[in-house]
């Protein structure tokens, strides 16, 4: 994926890598403060992982790493300098993710402004092993996730290699899909969708899984909308091959594929994120239309 420029803005990033989950990392900017919500993660249950409030990808069998990034004690100035050096976006996974975060923030800020809706950016926090959040403590096993109370996206970068090696989501644009999906959850928070869904789940527990699926599919649709808008406006250039990477990533994290790999059987009643086909269909709808109005998964 080509960007319209090579500038990387680290202002919204907090780096807690090496902090041991105690929140002692180098603060580089910061996220907003929310009032409601619980952890919204890319996956709720996977391979036996996950616990109350969120689960995710099991990283216990993480292969030897090729993921690239900075030292855990890197300062704000050092991160900015490294990510703005020649070739850094292509060389370093963290710099690439920050650049995707920048472009996603820019597109949604402009889009919501044209629709007369309030927008505020989420924070982006890198961590290793574990991290304290507004939703409680989370381990690397949850994978990338978004926390509504502190309006932050949390990523353990080692997860990206795990996703690509173990779940068949190859390519850099698969990483962009993950970022765009988590950004979709932030949109749901600031637009009021997420708190309404949580209230509905509490009022009608029998619909909890169904509502969770609809929430996740909408985030996939928002991710697709971002891809279309970013490409049309020149923020990024997305090739057909990269679109395929996003679709393969969406399929890789479908509940049916994960359940079959984990247990050898599929139980649609227990789905929390949607099937591979559903996730691909909603991402495609968003990308084809470029219109958030087409992402009403609750209709």
Image (tube, rainbow, N blue to C red):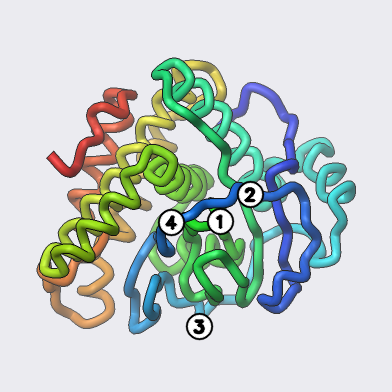
Number of marks in the rendered image? 4
Q: Position of residue 90 (x, y in %)?
A: 68, 42
Circle 1 residue:
150
Res. 167 in view: yes
Q: Are marks 2 and 1 in contact (CB under 8 Å)?
A: yes
Per the model, the C-alpha gap separating discs 4 and 3 is 31 Å
Is residue 86 rendered to the left or right of residue 209?
right
Q: Which mark is residue 31?
A: 2
Per the model, the C-alpha gap separating discs 4 and 2 is 15 Å
Task: Give the mark, 2 or 3, whose residue is nearer the N terminus.
Answer: 2
Helix, strand or loop at label 2? It is loop
Helix, strand or loop at label 3? It is loop
Residue shown at the point (42%, 31%) measured from the top left? 227
**181 over 116 or under it: above or below:** below
Circle 3 residue:
60
Q: Quadrant of the C terminus?
A: top left
């Amino acid at each position: 994926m080509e960007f319209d420029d090579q500038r990387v803005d680290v202002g919204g990033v907090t780096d807690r890598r090496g902090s041991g989950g105690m929140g002692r990392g180098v603060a580089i900017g910061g996220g907003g403060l929310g009032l409601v919500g619980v952890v919204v993660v890319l996956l709720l249950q996977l391979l036996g992982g996950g616990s109350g409030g969120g689960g995710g990808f099991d990283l216990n069998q993480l292969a030897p790493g090729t993921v690239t990034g900075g030292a855990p004690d890197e300062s704000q100035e050092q991160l900015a300098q490294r990510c703005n050096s020649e070739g850094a976006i292509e060389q370093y996974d963290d710099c690439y993710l920050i650049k995707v975060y920048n472009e996603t923030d820019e597109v949604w800020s402009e889009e919501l402004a044209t629709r007369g809706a309030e927008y505020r950016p989420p924070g982006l926090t890198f961590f290793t092993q574990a991290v304290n959040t507004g939703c409680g403590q989370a381990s690397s096993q949850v994978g990338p996730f978004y926390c509504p109370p502190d309006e932050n996206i949390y990523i353990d970068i080692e997860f990206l290699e795990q996703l690509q090696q173990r779940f068949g989501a190859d390519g850099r644009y698969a990483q962009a899909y993950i970022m765009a999906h988590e950004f979709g959850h932030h949109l749901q928070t600031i637009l009021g969708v997420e708190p309404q869904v949580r209230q509905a789940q509490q009022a009608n527990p029998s619909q909890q899984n169904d509502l969770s699926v609809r929430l996740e599919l909408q985030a996939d649709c928002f991710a697709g909308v971002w891809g279309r808008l970013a490409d049309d406006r020149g923020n990024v250039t997305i090739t057909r091959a990269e679109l395929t990477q996003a679709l393969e990533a969406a399929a890789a994290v479908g509940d049916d594929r994960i359940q079959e790999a984990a247990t050898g059987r599929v139980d649609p009643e227990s789905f929390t994120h949607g099937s591979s086909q559903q996730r691909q269909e909603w991402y495609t709808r968003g990308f084809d239309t470029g219109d958030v109005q087409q992402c009403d998964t609750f209709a």
